Every structure is written in C-alpha cells, then in structure tokens.
Image (cartoon, rainbow, N blue to C red):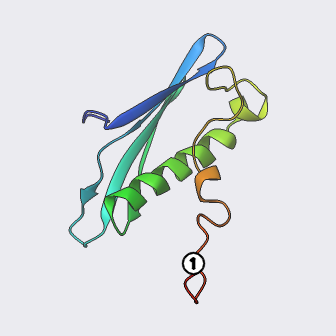
Amino acid sequence: MNDAAFVERTFESGDDKITIRFLQPTLAPGGEYQCRWAINWPNGVRQRYSCGLDGIQALMLAMKMVHSELVDSDLYKSGKLTYVDQYDLDLPPGWGEGQLYVPPEENGS
C-alpha cells in the first residue's frame, strides 16, 4: 500500500510483527465509500478494500474483513498471533455482534 495509513496496528507472532493498515475511506465513483486495507504478513502483503454507505461503515467493514483474515490464519489458529500478549485481537466482529443499543419504548419510557 503506497498511501499513508489512516490507522494501523501491530500484532506479535514470535519474533515477527504483523502490521495492519487502513487508509482513510474515500468516496468511489459509484457513490459508495471504499476503505483500502493491507496486512503485512512475514511472507508478503495482502491488500483489499471494503465498501460501505459512508466512511464509518466502510472502515468498520474493513476492520471486520481484516479480523476474519487474521483469525483464519495458521498463525492465529496455532496460538502464535497476539495483540499486547492477548489472543483477543480487539477488532470487530465483536463490536457489531448482537444488539448495539436498546431502542426506546413506543410509549416514550
């Protein structure tokens, strides 16, 4: 990924570091927002993008995609991929699982 990262995080795997980077979401020609992301694995870089109705949704969907890529990796499955010495990578899907808020009652209470 040639552009500067909007946000990034580094994970540990023994002596290796796995860095993920997200670019700032941008409006695409089709009207959707795109958030490009990359995972810098020890054996190469995987780059993709995720789309959303707005920049926040595009970024959150990109984070979910990266989370899926990480937990599906052999490094994670073997217990060798951590974030601050924890197996919880602190990325969605946990943020979007279940009910995010409780709507107000119809009678206003």
Q: Hey, which quadrant is residue 72 in on the image?
A: top right
Q: Nearer the viewer, residue 107 or 41?
A: 107
| Amino acid tagged 1 | Pro
Residue 11 position in % (x across, y down) = 57, 25
Left or right position of 55 against 8: left
Q: Secondary structure at mark 1?
A: loop
Q: Nearer the viewer, residue 37 or 89?
A: 89
Does any portion of residue 103 appear in the rendered image?
yes
Q: In percent of the image, x 70 and y 26: which residue is there? A: 86
Left or right position of 75 against 84: right
Left or right position of 34 against 77: left
Residue 60 position in % (x across, y down) = 46, 54
Residue 105 position in % (x across, y down) = 61, 83
Q: Return the residue found at the far front.
A: 109
Q: Nearer the viewer, residue 1 or 108?
A: 108
22 over 94 or under it: above or below: above
Q: In percent of the image, x 62 and y 48: which residue is there? A: 68
Q: Hey, which quadrant is residue 101 in on the image?
A: bottom right
Q: In percent of the image, x 25 and y 73: which residue is there? A: 30
Residue carrying label 1: 104
Mark 1: few/some/many CA within 10 Å (<14, 14-19, 20+): few
30 over 28 or under it: above or below: below
